[in-house]
Image (cartoon, rainbow, N blue to C red):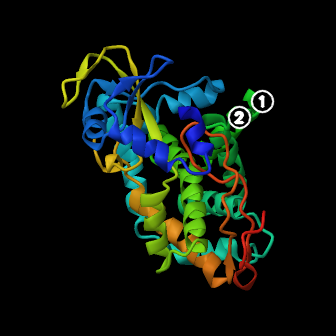
Amino acid sequence: MLQDLASSPDPRPRYADLQAAAPHRLTDGRWIVARSDDVATVVASPVAVVPPGHAVAPALARGRSQMARFSDGPDHAHRRAAAVEALDEMATVHWAEAVGRLAAGTLAPGVDAVEWARQTIAGVMTAVLGAADPPATAAAARIVTRALAPEAGHTPDDPAIVDAAWLAVVDALPAADEVARVNRAALVHQALDATAGLVAGALLARARGVRGGPGDVVHHALADDPPVLHTLRDTTDDLMLGDGTTIPRGAQVVVVLVGSDAFGVGPHRCPGAAVAQALAGVLVGAALDAGLEVPAHAPRYERRANLRIPARLVFQRVSDVSSPTAS
């Protein structure tokens, strides 16, 4: 089943089957599009819009309505510009120094690499974006991320706690106006889990024999086992694909991102890809410089809708990673 692919030990054969198939309707009524040319058509189409998402706490719902990620048309362009401005500022950041200051003393055998990556990413990004108390802001950002992108079976946090966390993140990030603050907070949310998943995938690739510098290992993981597997679009009008298939108005479309370059196509193309890859490379490099790797065995994955993130990866000394022992 599609919802199980993110937690599958190896979803690649199933995704290869989907990429070989024509667009079609799933048993639950949604459509699925996986061939690269069809994916490009959907994500670039003005009639394929981002769905509103599941219910969240009231203040966070208002914030989500101002995020570039959840808007289209002129509103999206304005909000995206606020996010891009922040990302342009990040492009000048010396990530190795920022990660080194935050991660000092936190890298050790027995530490969960996924949890370490999440803590470090949230702390570094909130610090770079100007939070006066990065650890507190990072902790609040993680509550927001759990609410916006929950794991299946996760017991939701109390709405009052979620709203307080959201407002704390927005208020902590200085910017010219509310839209800019909201979209800076959204950058932390969007980067947190996806980049942690990329770090975990790169560490696994390294453990399984992929060599090269940290950036090379990150690029391999992006191509071979990416952390973001698909996205959703709702059609506001009939949408015709290149082979003549028409996806009707009012349909929800699952757009498979694995094996395509959709992150660089369309109005919602990822503006933070370079920053995420740079940050992931620095985290992987920090772990390797500390003499740490993770076991090469297939881990258990979180039950996420479209994010591929190991539930736990325990750091071990490189000299100890000689056989696939369970973590």
Which residue matches tag 1? 158
Residue 32: percent from the left, percent from the top?
A: 40, 29
Does residue 173 appear anywhere in the picture? Answer: no
Q: Amino acid at mark 1?
A: Asp
Q: Place residue 128 in its image quadrant.
A: bottom right
**Above or below for 157 versus 122:** above
The CA span between labels 2 and 1 is 6 Å
**Above or below for 195 versus 320:** above
As helix, strand or loop, the secondary structure at mark 1 comes to: loop
Name the residue: 42% across, 59% down: 223
Q: Amino acid at mark 2?
A: Val
CB within 8 Å, label 2 to label 1: yes
Label of residue 302 in the image: none
Residue 144: percent from the left, percent from the top?
A: 65, 40
Counting the numbered discs, the total is 2
Question: In this image, 86 relative to 163: left or right?
Answer: left
280 and 211: which one is in front? 211
As helix, strand or loop, the secondary structure at mark 2 comes to: helix
Question: In this image, 158 relative to 74: left or right?
Answer: right
Name the residue: 54% across, 51% down: 194
Which residue matches tag 2? 162
Does residue 38 appear anywhere in the picture? Answer: yes
Name the residue: 43% across, 55% down: 86
Question: In this image, 325 relative to 272: left or right?
Answer: right
